[in-house]
Image (cartoon, grey):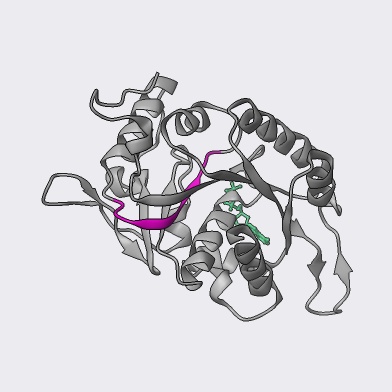
C-alpha cells in the first residue's frame, strides 16, 4: 500500500497540478518516451506550464531526449527542486543517481521510490504533468494509479498487431483502476522515403485506429516513422519544435490531447 505520511491524502499529492497525464505502452520500444517528451514540449508551446516526470526508472530516456544531464537541487524547505530545460520542469531518477547506475531494484523499492518522488518534488503550479511510465503493467503503473490522481492516460502503440495486443492489456489495467484513457496514439506509422517520395508501412497500418475504434476511445493521431525523430531524440531537441510533416503530426497530437 502507498506509504503516504499520515497527514497527507493522495489527493494532496501534486496539489498544484491541474492535469496528470500518464503516457503508457504495452511494449517497450514503441516510442512512449518520444511521445511523452514531445507531448510535454507541445503543450508548453501552447502556453501551458508543464512538468515531465520520467517514471521509467529501469530505462530512463527523458534526460537523453532533452539533453538534460543536470542534478536535482534542493529547495529552502528541503524538497527536491526539478531542473528546468526546454521550458519544462523535469524529474528523472538519473538526476538523483547519475546515468551510469543500473537500477536493479525489487518491486517494493520501486514503489517507495516513486511514491517519495511524487511527494517530495517541488513541482509548484502546473497545468500539466506528463508521466512517462515504464512499458507494461507492473509496479510503477500500479503505484502511480494508487498514489496520484491521474487525469487520464495516453496509450502508445505501433501499427503492428503484437504491439496493439499489448496495448489492449494496458487499456484493461486502466479500466480496472477506473482511470480514464484519453485516447490512443499510433507511432512509427507510414514512412515516406526521402529519395523516391513513395510511402511504406513498415510496421503495418491502421493498428492504432483499429484499437481506438474497438475500445471506443478517441484516436489521437498517427506519427510517421521518420529517422529525424531519432536524430532529434539523440540530439536532445524535441521534434515537435521542428518544421515539417513529423513536427506537424506531433503538434496536432498535442493539440488533440489538450482538448
Ligand atoms: P519507448 O519509450 O517506448 O521504449 P522510445 O521513445 O525510447 O520508446 O523510442 C525507441 C527508439 O525509437 C528511440 O531511439 C527513438 O528515437 C526511436 N523512435 C521513436 N519514435 C520514432 C519514429 N516515429 N520514427 C523513428 N524513430 C523513432
Q: Is residue 133 magenta?
A: yes
Q: Name the foreground residue: 127 vs 51.
A: 127
Give coordinates of residue 231: x percent, y percent.
58, 68
Which quarter of the rendered picture does the N terminus lie within?
A: top left
Residue at x 55%, y 60% (from the top left corner): 39
Give coordinates of residue 226: x percent, y percent.
70, 67
Q: Could you tell whether 123 is left or right of 189 in the image?
A: left
Looking at the rendering, the quadrant in which ligand 1 lies is bottom right
Q: Quadrant of residue 252?
A: bottom right
Which quarter of the rendered picture does the C terminus lie within?
A: bottom right
- Judge whether 99 appears above or below 68 on screen: above
Q: Is residue 49 magenta?
A: no
Give coordinates of residue 205: x percent, y percent.
86, 54
Q: Name the foreground residue: 107 vs 53.
A: 53
Give coordinates of residue 76: x percent, y percent.
11, 51
Residue at x 30%, y 26% (from the top left corner): 4
- Residue range of the region highlighted in magenta in the rendering: 123-134
- Judge whether 23 appears above or below 174 on screen: below
Amino acid at each position: 500500500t502507498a506509504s503516504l505520511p499520515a497527514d497527507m491524502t493522495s489527493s494532496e499529492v501534486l496539489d498544484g497540478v491541474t492535469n496528470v497525464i500518464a503516457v503508457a505502452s504495452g511494449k517497450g520500444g514503441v516510442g512512449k518516451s518520444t511521445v511523452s517528451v514531445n507531448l510535454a514540449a507541445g503543450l508548453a508551446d501552447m502556453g501551458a506550464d508543464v512538468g515531465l516526470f520520467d517514471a521509467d526508472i529501469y530505462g530512463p530516456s527523458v534526460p537523453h531526449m532533452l539533453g538534460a544531464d543536470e542534478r536535482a537541487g534542493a529547495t529552502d524547505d528541503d524538497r527536491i527542486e526539478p531542473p528546468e530545460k526546454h521550458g519544462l520542469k523535469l524529474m528523472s531518477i538519473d538526476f538523483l543517481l547519475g546515468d551510469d547506475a543500473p537500477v536493479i531494484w525489487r518491486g517494493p523499492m520501486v514503489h517507495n521510490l516513486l511514491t517519495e518522488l511524487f511527494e517530495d518534488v517541488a513541482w509548484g503550479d502546473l497545468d500539466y504533468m506528463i508521466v512517462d511510465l515504464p512499458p507494461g503493467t507492473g509496479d510503477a503503473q500500479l503505484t502511480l494509479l494508487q498514489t496520484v490522481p491521474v487525469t487520464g492516460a495516453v496509450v502508445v502503440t505501433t501499427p503492428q498487431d503484437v504491439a496493439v495486443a499489448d496495448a489492449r492489456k494496458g487499456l484493461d489495467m486502466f479500466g480496472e483502476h477506473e482511470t480514464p484513457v484519453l485516447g490512443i496514439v499510433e507511432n512509427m506509422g507510414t514512412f515516406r522515403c526521402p529519395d523516391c517520395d513513395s510511402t511504406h508501412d513498415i510496421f503495418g497500418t491502421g493498428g492504432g485506429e483499429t484499437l481506438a475504434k474497438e475500445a471506443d476511445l478517441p484516436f489521437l493521431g498517427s506519427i510517421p516513422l521518420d529517422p529525424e525523430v531519432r536524430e532529434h531524440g539523440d540530439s536532445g531537441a524535441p521534434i515537435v519544435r521542428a518544421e515539417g510533416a513529423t513536427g506537424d503530426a506531433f503538434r496536432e497530437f498535442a493539440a488533440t490531447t489538450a482538448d
